[in-house]
Each structure stands twice: as C-alpha cells, then as structure tokens.
Amino acid sequence: MAQPRKLVTHPGWLRVTHWLNALAVLVMVMSGWRIYDASPIFPFQFPRALTLGGWLGGALLWHFAAMWLLFANGVFYVAMGLVTGRFRRQLFQLRPRQVWHDFVAAVRGQLSHDDLTHYNAVQKLAYLVAIVDLIVIVLSGLVVFKPVQFSNLGALMGGYEGARVAHFVAMSVLVAFVLIHVVMAAAVPRTILAMIRGR
Ligand code: HEM
C-alpha cells in the first residue's frame, strides 16, 4: 500500500536558521541590556538578572560573538529566502485589506490554523517587520561598533548618538515581536512542532 506523502512545511535550512537566529537574538538582547546598563540612554536600567555577561567587558564579548552568528545566519536566511522563492511564495503578496481582514478574524478567534504551509496576512506582515527590523539592528549596530569607519551610514541615523537610539528602538521592536510571536506560537503548539520537525 502506498505510504501517504509527508507534507514538508518548513525546509531544513529554514528550521536551522530560525533556531540559530532565536539563539543569537537571545544572547544579543541579554548582553545588549548589560552593555546599556553600563551607560543608559534613558532614565532606567534593565534588571541584572535578565542580563548576560556579568559586567561590561563580559557582555561585550558575548555581544560580539553572537553578532557574527546573527549576521552570517541572517545573510544565509535572506539569500535562501530569495533564491528558493520562499519569500515570494510565503511572505508576498501582502495587501493591506488582507492584513485588516485577518487581523479582525484573529481578534474574533476565527482564524483557521488547518493549513500550516500557509501564513495569514498578519503573520506575513509581522515576519517582514522582524526581518527589516533585524537589518536595522545590524546596520545601527555597525555604526555604534565602528562610528568612524561607518560615518556615512551614521550620518543617516543622526550620528553616533542617533545610531544608539535607533539600535535601542529596533531592539525594543524586536523584543515586542518575539514576545507576541512566542505567545502566538504557543497558542497553536503544532506550529512549534512543525518548526522543529519540518512536517
Ligand atoms: C527570538 C527571535 C525570533 C525571531 C526573530 C523569529 C522570527 C521568525 C520568522 C521571520 C519566521 C518566519 C520564517 C519564514 O517562514 O521564512 C518565524 C516562524 C516561526 N517561529 Fe520564530 N522567531 C524567533 C523566535 C521564536 C521562538 C522562541 C519560537 C518558539 C516558541 C518561534 C516559533 C516559530 C514558529 C512555530 C514559526 C512558524 C509559524 C507557523 O508555521 O505558523 N520563534 N519566526
């Protein structure tokens, strides 16, 4: 008897880059908060227990180590998304009316989760925001890391101080995305299994 074909929802390269990215983001955010605490821009600090690195020097080492993982993994993910046509198939087309329609359906609890190969429009928008936001994080991080070498890029962000604020705002957007993303994924646990096993 013919075996039913297993439906691959998430190819291997996507699962590996997704979880490596999650690890890199966790290390970057927690060490970043420790670096921020050493010289806060705003009148608050992050609780020490939520930070990584112990002190400024240790946090910088974690931040710079995870930076290479985030960058290399991100470049590979974007290249594969473009080359394989996944971005075109899964994240586009995206129409504002569709986003609104799916948002209203989600609020009413009427969104279907039957087909895990297909993202709803709100999900597509959230993923695109996360991807663009990560690019802003890397670019503003480069300016904060090497302000002289990247002075032209820095000028677009209002100089070194502007790049620091841009880096912080982009981090905040990413943390908000991750919090919502994890809650939504946990609400439909099959999606987490699919992101681990691919089917
Ligand atoms: C920490 C930073 C994270 C970022 C930036 C991130 C970003 C993304 C992106 C961009 C996608 C779409 C991938 C594509 O199809 O090309 C995705 C999918 C997904 N992520 Fe994450 N993610 C993160 C963490 C997590 C965590 C911690 C979980 C576990 C709870 C998770 C669970 C999932 C699942 C289940 C999907 C597939 C959703 C579905 O099939 O409906 N993610 N993520």
Image: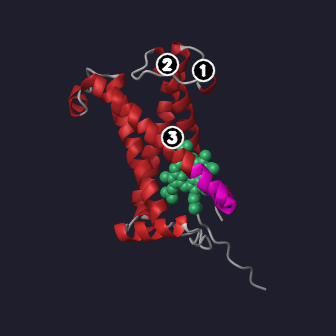
How far apart are labels 2 and 1 at the CA level? 9 Å
Q: CA distance from mark 2 to mark 3?
A: 17 Å
- Three-letter code for the amino acid on which mark 3 is drawn: Val
Whether residue 160 sits left or right of residue 138 in the image: it is: left
Q: Main secondary structure of the magenta part?
A: helix
Q: CB atoms at circles 2 and 1 under 8 Å apart?
A: yes
Q: CA distance from mark 3 to mark 1?
A: 17 Å
Q: Position of residue 52 (x, y in %)?
A: 59, 24
Q: Which residue is mark 3?
A: 175
Residue type pointed to by label 2 = Asp
Q: Can you say which quadrant of the picture contains the N terminus?
A: bottom right
Q: Which stretch did the figure color magenta?
A: 181-195
In the rendered image, the vertical position of residue 124 relative to residue 1, given as above or below: above
Q: Is residue 35 left or right of residue 15?
A: left
Disc number for residue 13: none
Q: Residues within 10 Å of mark 2 (few under 14, many from 20)?
A: some
Q: Secondary structure at mark 2?
A: helix
List the single residue furthest toward the bottom: 1
Residue ID at (49%, 19%): 37
Q: Nearer the viewer, residue 27 or 188?
A: 188
Which mark, residue 48? 1
